[in-house]
Amino acid sequence: MEAVPNQQRNSLQNVEKNKAKNKIPNDVEMDIENLYEILPQLSQIFRIIDKIGEGTFSSVYLAEAQMNDGSRRMFALKHLIPTSQPMRIAAELQCLTVAGGTENVMGVTYCFRKEHHVVIVMPYMEHQAIGEIAGSLAFEEVKHYIFHLLKALSHIHKFGIIHRDIKPTNFLYNRQKKEYALVDFGLAQGTTDTQIELLKELLESRCVFGERNLNNTNTKPSVEKVEGQLLKPNKEEAVPCKIVSTKRRLVPVRAPLNGQAQKDTPVTLTLSAQKLNPAAVCQTLTCSCYMTDRICNVCLSRKQQVAPRAGTPGFRAPEVLTKCPNQGTAIDMWSAGVILLSLLSGRYPFFKASDDLIALAQIMTIRGSKETIEAANKFGKSIVCSQELPRLNLRILCETLRGLRTCDGSLPAEFQVSHHPTDAGSAANRGSLRSDEELQEMGWYKVPDEVYDLLDKLLDLNPETRITAVMALQHPLFNDMTDSLM
Ligand code: ADP
Ligand code: MG
Ligand code: ZN
């Protein structure tokens, strides 16, 4: 880093200055003060101005540094929670250093470490929250946004990086400058042939669950051994996958199961939190609840299937929600599809699911229950749904939600109510608040079929056939996108 060390610029002065300006609340001041105390070197280089992000795993600050040429530059300082696994932190950094700084992927400038405190320094990118602008985006902006997201995905996937947490808050967008940056590799995993060494090591050390370690930095060897057995589960190890109880709120009517034949490779989806080989139970006891909407005692006592399950429920792919152990870069493509669905319909977030089963039920509501069950069967999972939900036409769905057409009976009447209960009957969150002229100007009356074709291919329930980022960039939708637009 070419910043000029500035001894006088100490933290106390900063806080005084901030107080004088009366710009930032006290708790943020305290956090900034704490950070200066933890890593005193920071105060020699940066003036930390504000906290701009706070999640479960990190706090992100806006900071200014004076450069050698006298200019001032803004940086984002990501302070990782001190309980993060060292290996995870190192892997996050390596993703940024190896794949970042180009192709719409955030780069890294520097990294500070003292004991278990780590601060990643990145160039600051001013950005808008998608939640705030989703309704005001023109169609062309949506198209560009998705194009640039696909570019970032194609780039990281080339390195064998699975991001695992693709969502708008991790894909920064500067609307004025038309700049884009993929951030947050805190949940990233490697493909089996990844070029990121530390992701490879993460895979081998079985830290693949995406659950960032909140309370312990030492993994007990015995735990690793148990989890390791599940890395390559074979057919005999599997038990029935059940979608239970939570679903019934959304699909209350029981219906026949379309003559669905019993699969021999089922896997439990019970809600227990333990991680153990499910085969241990399965081999000795017989389940009596398979293909019913109850859970028998055998299944209740089963240990939870272990599979990577990172990310945010509403953006998770069906294979993630059903805990399929073999997950690849296709999971990021699904999330990109959910983002596109959200931007086309003007509803953000689109799927508001508090847990995986609700998320899966919501996917079925859009993509069809039969189709979801069929796809799950292909990746070795069996789902029981008590009601058949038809697959919806994506154009009709998006246009209805945006207020371009009135609900004409082609969508299930209860859809909007059950899916977005708070929006029911209120126009506040609907596209219909915009005048026809506005919608016309924004291009929403001449949305090409290609975009719905791409959406359909991104939201392919089967990861094997789901479109890749490289293929998506070549989709006819982007025929007119030249390098000058990128
Ligand atoms: P977390 O793991 O806590 O989600 P992120 O890396 O996603 O951390 O950062 C959290 C938020 O901080 C982002 O959603 C974004 O708003 C902001 N942020 C992160 N990196 C930058 C950056 N380089 N420039 C500007 N803002 C950033
Ligand atoms: Mg994030
Ligand atoms: Zn059972």
Image (cartoon, rainbow, N blue to C red):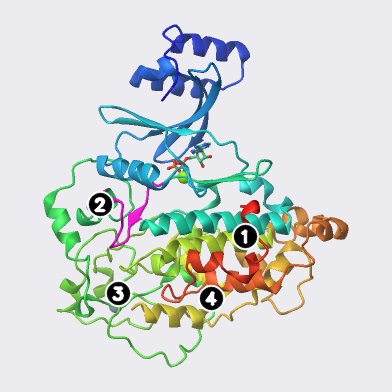
- Which residue is label 3 attached to? 267
| 3D distance between C-alphas at marks 2 and 4 | 42 Å
Q: Residue at position x 63%, y 65% from top?
A: 478
The amino acid beneath tag 3 is Val
Using the rendered image of the protein, determine whether residue 348 is visible from the camera's viewpoint. no
Spatial distance from mark 1 to mark 4, Cα to Cα?
26 Å
> Looking at the image, which residue sits at the far right?
437
Q: In the displayed structure, does residue 443 sit left or right of residue 310?
A: right
Amino acid, disc 1:
Ser
Q: Does the beta carbon of the residue at mark 3 sit less than 8 Å from ligand 3?
A: no
Residue 190 part of the magenta segment: yes
Q: Nearer the viewer, mark 2 or mark 1?
A: 2
Closer to the N terminus: mark 1 or mark 4? 4
**Which residues fall within the magenta stretch?**
185-197
Q: Of helix, strand and loop, which one carries label 2?
A: helix
Quickly name the residue at label 2: 202
- Work out which quarter of the rendered image holds the N terminus and state it: top left
Q: Amino acid at mark 4?
A: Pro
Is the C-beta separation of discs 2 and 4 under 8 Å? no
Whichever of labels 4 and 3 marks the residue nearer the N terminus, that label is 4
Question: Is 175 colored magenta in this rendering?
Answer: no
Disc 4 target residue: 252
